[in-house]
Image (tube, grey):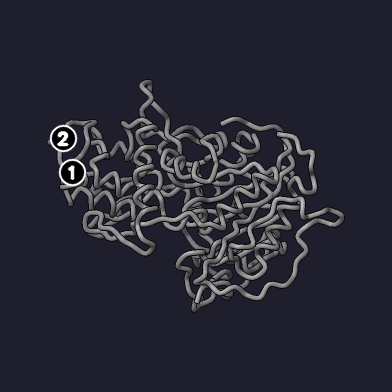
Amino acid sequence: MRIPSLRTVVGLAAVVALGTSVPAAAAPHVPSGPSGVDSARCPRLSTALEWFGDNRERLQRAIDERGTCSNPDLKRGERPVAAFDWDNTVTKNDITDLAIAWALKHDRILRPANWADTSPWLTEKAVRRLTEACGTDVPVGRPLRTSTNIACTDEIFSIREGAKLVSGENAFTGDWNRRRTVPQYAWVSQLFAGHTEAEVNAIARASRAAALAAPVGSTQKVGSHTIHAYARYYPQMRNLISTLKRAGFEVWIDSAGAAPITEPWAAGVGIDREHVIAIRNVLDRRGRITTTIKGCGGEPEGKGENIPYIEGKRCWLNQEAFGVTGPAAWQRQAPRHRPAIVAGDANTDVSMVEDATAAHLVINRNQNEILCKAYDNADGRWVVNPMFIEPLPRKSTAYPCSTTGFVNPDGSLGPVLRQDGTVIPDQRDTVHGR
């Protein structure tokens, strides 16, 4: 990706529009245009799409203050940045699961020479079980017959879905930084080793077409597993992205999915490959995907130790969008080197969402750390919205912010802290579906 020049940065918090199944609270009037600006000339979020409470107005105000409405002469290197997670932020449902399901049903996974080569964290039992279930009759580099070999499909999808074998045993072991990677996420991109990126793009497009055509709420069988069959672009997020672009923002996707899967979906909201941050594998001399994954923040290429996951999302956004290199990319930057608006839905997004300087948009999926930050609302710029499709009901218990809401690098749990180091008290769920 290109490295842009120094810019004024506007942090974006993920904004989620609420569908008709989610009640919209009465919205007080919030002036949307900055003082002295004719807001009628500014790009506007659609009033035909429903948001929770006054969320639309709050997002509009952030757009007006940071975009061309207030800064009509923004130059290329000065454009404010907005960043979005993908799965369950821009779309309802996980597009990586959909792509893996389609690939398994259509025999698109190529047999590795040794399953141990696909991840350094696979247990010996996992390697042995994958070898037994998927067989050795298919030549190395040729498609496994997963459409008919249910045992192979089940083991692969069980590892992807819950990091466990069908037997229930852990599929991964060893040490990894829980705020920089998760083995089963990295493993997905490694499963496509031997393909070109264009071939994986084609798999993503095929799974996308099937998911968009499937009825909302529909499911499918993947071996013995039942998962969602459908996905939808949230209309509110499409509108938010297009409004940001018209207002002069540089919009990025920052996802823990595989890049060749994410790119075709991102194109559907007008975001090109150069603005998609996701897990990107090293290619061999023939242009084929390898099991080696690119590193961030001065870290070397490896097997997925530093993917766009929690702190990794911050690192990759700092590196790709702001040109921050070396170990500094892992650190929170000064406000002028941070995004203006960021949207996310999960703990995996919390670092980049917190870095936003104008709006932190969170789609409520009852994730502890990010909802602790959002409901605490330390800077008054956190925007929480229920999922626009099939929103979750109110969480019956408080988020355990003061005790176990934070995941440490070693996997242990602790309290969620504010930027000043103070502990966030437990928070109640107040923005939800019926």
The amino acid type found where label 1 is placed reads: Cys
Please tell me which residue lies in front, 228 or 236.
Answer: 236
Instruction: Judge whether 172 appears above or below 428 on screen.
Output: above
Q: Looking at the image, which residue is at 71% across and 60% down?
A: 420
Which labelled disc corresponds to residue 138? 2
Corner quadrant of residue 399 = bottom right
Left or right relative to 353: residue 223: left
Left or right relative to 59: residue 238: left
Q: Looking at the image, which residue is at 49% across and 72% down?
A: 21
Residue 88 appears in the rendering = yes
Q: How many marks?
A: 2
Left or right relative to 228: residue 75: right
Instruction: Judge whether 230 appears above or below 271 on screen.
Output: below
Q: Residues within 10 Å of mark 2 (few under 14, many from 20)?
A: few
Q: Secondary structure at mark 2?
A: loop
Q: Looking at the image, which residue is at 56% across and 34% down?
A: 298
Q: Which residue is mark 1?
A: 134
The amino acid type found where label 2 is placed reads: Val
Residue 230 in the image, given as x and y percentages of width and height: 37, 57
Residue 389 in the image, given as x and y percentages of width and height: 47, 64
Which labelled disc corresponds to residue 290? none
Please tell me which residue lies in front, 80 or 205.
Answer: 205
Q: Residues within 10 Å of mark 1 (few under 14, many from 20)?
A: many
Q: Looking at the image, which residue is at 70% across and 62% down?
A: 58
Please tell me which residue lies in front, 101 or 388.
Answer: 388
Q: Secondary structure at mark 1?
A: helix
Corner quadrant of residue 232 = bottom left
Cβ–Cβ below 8 Å for labels 1 and 2?
yes
Per the model, the C-alpha gap separating discs 1 and 2 is 9 Å
